[in-house]
Image (cartoon, rainbow, N blue to C red):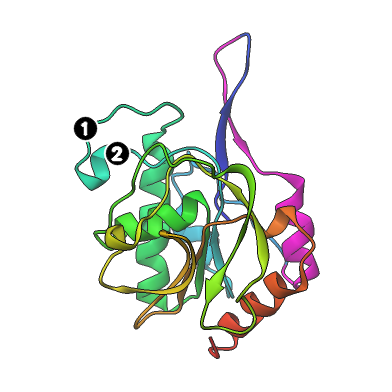
Amino acid sequence: MSTRVTEADNYSEKRNSIAYEYIDFFEKLGFLIYLIPNNTNNIKSYFKTKIDLIVLSGGNNVNPNLYNNNELLKDVYDERDTLEIELLHISQKNNIPLLGICRGFHMINVFFKGLISHNIKNHVNKNHILQSQNNILNDKETNSFHNQGIMINDLSDKLEIIALSDDIVEMFIHKDKQILGIQWHPERQTNKFDKEIINKFLEGKL
C-alpha cells in the first residue's frame, strides 16, 4: 500500500503516513499489509514475496504537470507520483490487481492519459448517491472528500465507468487489466457494499 507524504509543523521533516482506517479496512478484507514508503530505493524488494493486491491510497494531489495542466496545486510531492507510477508498471508487468482510492483513483486515470478537473464544487465532506448499472452500487450513498475530480470527458479511453455522481466519475475499471479506481473513501464508512464490490473485483467478477 502506498502512503501519504506529511510534514512536521514546526521543523523540516517529511513523513510517510497512513490513516488507521486503511489498516482496519483491509485487515477485515483478509490482507496482511505492507506499507511502501515514498522515499524507498528498493521498491522491487517488496515484490519478492507474493503480493495479492496493490493499493494506491488517498491524500496529497497528483502533480498537474503529469496531465499537461500548468495550474499550481499545494500538497504535491513528486516522489509520491514517481513511486505510484512505478507501482502501476509493476502491477501491469506482473498481473497484480491494483486498487486506487481517491488520489490513487486520480493517479490511475492520469497514468492512462486521462485528465483531472480542479476545484470541484460540493464534493468535500459531503455524501452523494451513486448512479450505476451495477446493482451493488446503484442508489447507494457514499462519502466524498475531494477538490479535484474526473468528469466523464476526462476519463481515459482505457477505463470504463462503473458509477457516477451527476457528471463526476465515482468508480471505474480498466477495460483489459485488473485495475479498479474508487473516488470515495471506503475505509471511512461501514457500508457492506464497499467490501462486496472490492471482493467481486478481486474475484474477477466485476
Q: Tell me the distance, in whole angstroms, between the alpha carbons under discs 1 and 2.
A: 6 Å
What residue would you read off at disc 1?
70
Q: Which amino acid lies under the numbered mark 1 shown in the image of this protein?
A: Asn
Residue stretch in magenta? 11-31
Q: Is residue 201 magenta?
A: no
Q: Residue at x 72, y 64 (%)?
A: 26
Q: Please state the horizontal and vertical placement of residue 131, each as a whole percent of the image.
A: 53, 71
Q: Which amino acid lies under the numbered mark 2 shown in the image of this protein?
A: Pro
Q: Is residue 16 magenta?
A: yes
Q: Please state the horizontal and vertical placement of residue 162, each as a whole percent of the image.
A: 47, 75
Q: Are marks 1 and 2 in contact (CB under 8 Å)?
A: yes
Q: Give the image quarter of residue 112.
A: bottom left
Q: Please state the horizontal and vertical placement of residue 118, each as a whole percent of the image.
A: 36, 39
Q: Residue at x 58, y 75 (%)?
A: 50
Q: Residue furthest top?
A: 10
Q: Residue at x 61, y 84 (%)?
A: 135
User: What number is the disc on residue 64?
Assistant: 2
Secondary structure, mark 2, is helix
In this view, 15 is above or below 138: above
Tell me how many marks there are. Answer: 2
Q: Please state the horizontal and vertical placement of residue 190, each as a whole percent of the image.
A: 80, 62
Taking depth in this image into account, of 38 and 178 the one nearest to the observer is 178
Secondary structure, mark 1, is loop
